[in-house]
Amino acid sequence: MQTEQIISSLLESNTFIAKKNNECLIIDAGAQPQQIAQKVANHKVLGLLLTHGHYDHCLHAVEIANHFGCKIFASKKIVETLSDPAKNYGETFKIEDFSNFVLLEDEQEFSLGEFEIAATLLPGHSKCSMGYLIDGTLFAGDVLFSQGIGRTDLYGGSKQQMLQSLITIKERIPFEILASGHGDMSNAESQKRNLNLFIRFLSR
């Protein structure tokens, strides 16, 4: 699998394109369809995966799904966040029609084309934070960064839930590459110290 990164103008959030043969997935929707189309090229888009419901990761979700003719996949807990600008921090941004969404349960595994996807709910930054493990790459949104973790002081955030999510990532998700919602990608080896550091910090 080949992963390409687009840094959007929305708080420099990342949108990722995961490619395999002539198919691809889009992860998060801060970038505009025109930006994504340049990376997608002649690949068939099988789906848009949202890591959580904050506006900088979802603003163009419906537009992207309509442009590429695909479904939107996200935690079932995302509906509350996307329905309310006060909870997604998008000022006036909200989604009212979820008919094109596929709402996922925790630890749900599913296939799109040749992609095998394991979705795990990872609350702490938000109630609806979900990580997607695809071919050894964990698309973790704003739960875990290359050298830090996400904020826990926003709506639905929780230090205790963040602690449990970090333990889940460390002990139960066999990732090799981390693709975060902001910043650079990193690898499992470099994340050992990061995870241990913040697990100790949040355990105090």
Image (cartoon, rainbow, N blue to C red):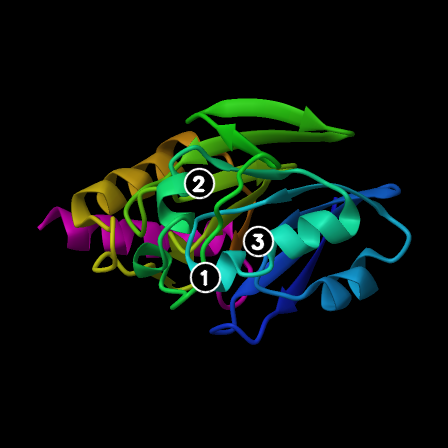
Q: Earlier in the sequence, mark 2 or mark 3?
A: 3
User: In percent of the image, x 55 and y 29: which residue is there?
Assistant: 118
Image marks 1 and 3: residues in contact by CB distance under 8 Å:
no
Which of the two discs, 1 and 2, sits closer to the camera?
A: 1
- Residue 155: in sight, yes or no? yes
Per the image, label 2 sits on a secondary structure element best described as strand
- Tell me the amino acid under the disc marked 1: Phe
User: How many numbered discs, if any?
Assistant: 3
Position in image of residue 156 (x %, y %): 25, 48
Q: In this view, which residue lies farthest toward the left?
A: 204
Question: Is 66 in front, or is 153?
Answer: 66
Look at the image and give the residue range highlighted in magenta: 182-204
User: Judging from the image, what secondary structure is the residue with disc 3 in?
Assistant: loop
Looking at marks 1 and 2 on the same chain, the residue that comes earlier in the sequence is marked by 1
Name the residue type under label 3: Asp
Residue neighbourhood size for the residue with mark 3, other residues' Cα within 10 Å, grouped as few (<14), some (14–19), many (≥20) = many
Residue 43 in the magenta stretch? The answer is: no
Q: Dot 1, crowdedness within 10 Å: few (<14), some or many (≥20)?
A: some
Outermost residue toward the front? 96
Check disc 1 and report the residue beneath it: 93
The mark nearer the N terminus, 1 or 3, is: 3
Nearer to us of marks 1 and 3 is: 1
Can you identify the residue that label 2 sits on?
130
Disc sitting over residue 16 in the figure: none
Determine which residue is flagged by label 3. Answer: 28
Q: Residue 60 location, x and y as percent?
A: 60, 59
Q: CA distance from mark 2 to mark 3?
A: 11 Å
